[in-house]
Image (spheres, helix red, strand yellow):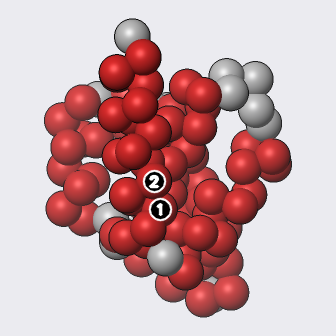
Amino acid sequence: MRDELTRRAGGYVQADVDAWLAHALAAHLGHYRDPAVREAAAGLLPPSVLAHAALLAELAHLVPGAGIDQLAFAARLSTTEPEAAGALAAFLARARSEAS
């Protein structure tokens, strides 16, 4: 679906499509409500989208009232450094579980 959306609209919207998919995946919205679909997404979406989703999910736990516009930095970090964004998400998840 990601490739089809980008193909139809042109490559210039790739960042918007990726941000939308990451937000939906992180918040378990729409298609991603189903756990099996979320699991399948791990094999279909690029590392930057998965890292962005993981980072958004952890930041939402950290600051529940944060709007998506306040978290735009997560997309930039995930696009330029997906491994670092994924590592940060894992670190935040570990910190959250240790604090519980």
Pick whichever, 6 or 49, lies toward us.
Answer: 49
* Gap between marks 2 and 1 measured at Cα: 5 Å
Residue 9 in the image: above or below residue 51:
below
Q: Tag 1: Cα neighbours inside 10 Å, few (<14), some, or many (≥20)?
A: many
Q: In this view, does 63 lie to the left or right of 99?
A: right
* Residue placed furthest toward the top: 100
- The residue type indicated by label 2 comes to Leu
Which residue lies under the disc numbered 2? Answer: 88
Residue 21 drawn at (x, y percent): 50, 54
The answer to whether residue 52 of the structure is visible from this angle is yes
The answer to whether residue 4 of the structure is visible from this angle is no
Q: Which mark, residue 85?
A: 1
Q: In this view, does 98 lie to the left or right of 92?
A: left
- The residue type indicated by label 1 comes to Ala
Residue 6 in the image: above or below residue 87:
below
Pick whichever, 1 or 19, lies toward us.
Answer: 19
Query: Can you say which quadrant of the picture contains the N terminus?
Result: bottom left
Count the marks. 2
